[in-house]
Image (tube, grey):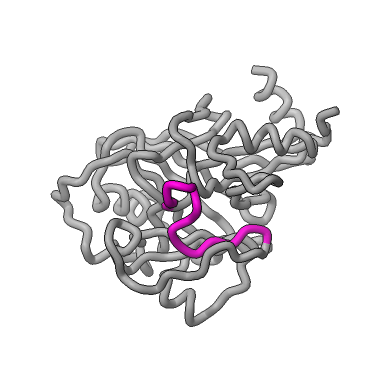
Amino acid sequence: MIFRFALMWLLSAGVVQAASCKDVTYEGAGYSVCHVDMASEKLQLFLYDAEGVPYGQFDTINRALKADGKTLGFAMNAGMYHDDRAPVGHYVEDGKELMRVIPNAGPGNFGLLPNGVLCIREGRADVIETLRFVDEAPNCTHATQSGPMLVIDGALHPRFLKDGTSRYLRNGVGTSANGKTAVFVISKGFVNFHTFGSFFRDHLKLPQALFFDGNVSRLYAPDLNRNDFGRRLGPIIGTVIDTGAPAN
């Protein structure tokens, strides 16, 4: 309650902006949806702390941010990772590349081409299909590669089956055509790829969307009283709010 009051006060004072999160039901399936306005919010990736140790949990990031007078507005896991929490695909944080682009097909969901990259630049965020990303070579401040793509230029991934039997909690991100809005979604129940991708395409009307992960999908969203906890994560994405009150 105190957190909510403080956040509302900061917003009304024009100090910060926070992602807007809400629960939505579409065609019988429930989703938690967080909209990020790239013009007014700071969206970034988190993987390792100052000592090179993976953050792993939302609370660990919040403790680190608190020392600088900041806090997470929202957050979720942001791509597949190895047992040591290192990213499977391309990863850039604060302009530093930690993992190269993986352009070829491979096993598992990540290698189910086409896959893609979420590229964050000043004032915009774009989901870009991997081979197009390689061609365009955008200069991303933050980037994470995952797969498969859910929506490519307004079409569902060609391998998705309406009656697919692989059903998990899933999370992902879609971006608007102008790059000004990023929309993060986590399912509230078990869904297949076709159902999940259709939510981005048909309900959210987003032309590009990317799958982050399934089964381990987690969300931090104070708006929804959610701070999911479980096994340690690899890449995490979230908005950062400047509270103006660094810890002593």
In the shown orientation, is residue 107 left or right of residue 152? Answer: left
Tell me residue 210's x, y (percent): 40, 57
Residue 60: image x %, image y %? 62, 34
At x 38%, y 38%, the residue is 31
**Magenta span:** 80-94
Horizontal and vertical percent position of residue 188:
35, 33
Vertical comparison of 190 with 150: above or below: above
Q: Write the residue at 48% across / 48% down.
A: 84
**Which quadrant: the N terminus?**
top right
Q: Residue furthest top?
A: 1
User: Nearest the camera: 197 or 48?
Assistant: 48
User: In the displayed image of the protein, which residue is found farthest to the right?
Assistant: 248
| Drawn side of residue 208 relative to residue 221, left or right | left
Residue 185 in the image: above or below residue 11: below
Report the front residue among 143 and 199.
143
Q: Is residue 57 above or below residue 173?
A: above
Q: Is residue 164 left or right of residue 123?
A: left
Along the line of sight, the residue nearer the viewer: 120 or 79 = 79
Give the image quarter of residue 169.
Answer: top left
Q: Position of residue 74 (x, y in %)?
A: 58, 39
Apparent side of residue 217 relative to residue 8 in the rendered image (left or right): left
- Residue found at x 37% / y 65%: 115
Q: Residue at x 37, y 52 (%)?
A: 200
Asked whether 81 falls inside the magenta stretch, the response is: yes
Classified by dominant secondary structure, the portion drawn in magenta counts as loop
